[in-house]
Image: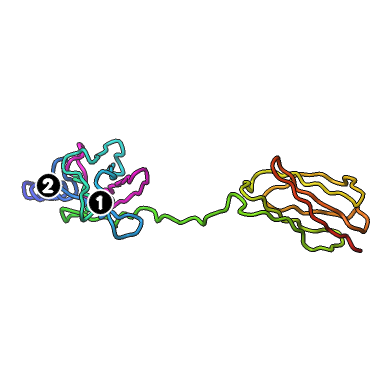
Amino acid sequence: MKKIIIPILLFSMFVLTTFTLHAGIPHAVYAYVYESDGTTHPPIDAITLEAFIEVRPDEVLTQESADCEYGTPDGLLKVQVGNFPTSWCFGDVINVTVYNNGDEQVGSVSLTYSGYDQMDPIIFNIAIEQPEIETSFINNQLMNQPNPFSSITTINYAIKGMLKSENVKISFYNTIGQLVLEDLARNGVYQFDASDLATGIYFYKIETKNFNKFNKMMIMR
């Protein structure tokens, strides 16, 4: 009977020591941290971190925890797993959230037998340069195409210094000065439908508080 019990006890001790490590036993997790260019490292005062084992998200280590830190010039981040208050096991997954001046990246790794584990590099989002969008007109312009036209023409306009998003009044007149249509335009373009108008010459005007300009168009059928 003793011969059976002793191997069972030895096996149980082996399992316990192999798969469970109690809190306080050192095991470091490392990661290199990069800016969006993939080569430079963020400054120390820009980085904060939070780390937790996936099955126990309420137990969190930060850069204020003992032996948890980020340093330059090599950009190496370190989390000491042995500082979690609850025992941990090989195979546990540790998640590390790294903050860089408001930006956030997450890394994770399964704990192994080696005494330390290294996560993939943490690279902060590549800044996508947005094309510059003109928000105001840079010159004055008023024209329509096609001209002459049979039914529909597109009027393009610009008023120097005015925001493209602002409305302008656009008015249409016949040759004796009668108003045939009045509307609002924006973003420098207006499509004019003359299907209900007779063949002939017409005038159109764009107008703001400080600017107005006329041009001529011809309807031919």
Q: Nearer the viewer, residue 162 or 134?
A: 162
Using a 10 Å C-alpha cutoff, classify the residue at mark 2 as few (fewer than 14 neighbours), some (14 to 19) or many (20 or more). Answer: few
Q: Which residue is pictured at 86% across the width and 49% down the height?
A: 173
Q: Which residue is pictured at 26% across the width and 48% down the height?
A: 43
x then y, percent, for residue 183: 79, 44
- Residue 128 vs residue 123: left or right? right
Q: Nearer the viewer, residue 151 or 206?
A: 206
Amino acid residing under circle 2: Met
The residue under label 2 is 13
Magenta-drawn stretch, dominant element (helix, strand or loop): strand
Q: How many marks?
A: 2
x then y, percent, for residue 33: 28, 53
User: Element at badge 2?
Assistant: helix
Q: Which residues are magenta?
A: 82-110
The residue under label 1 is 91
Q: Nearer the viewer, mark 2 or mark 1?
A: 1
Residue 171 falls within the magenta-colored stretch: no
How far apart in space, not on screen, are marks 2 and 1 (Cα)? 18 Å
Q: Identify the mark nearer the N-term, 2 or 1.
A: 2
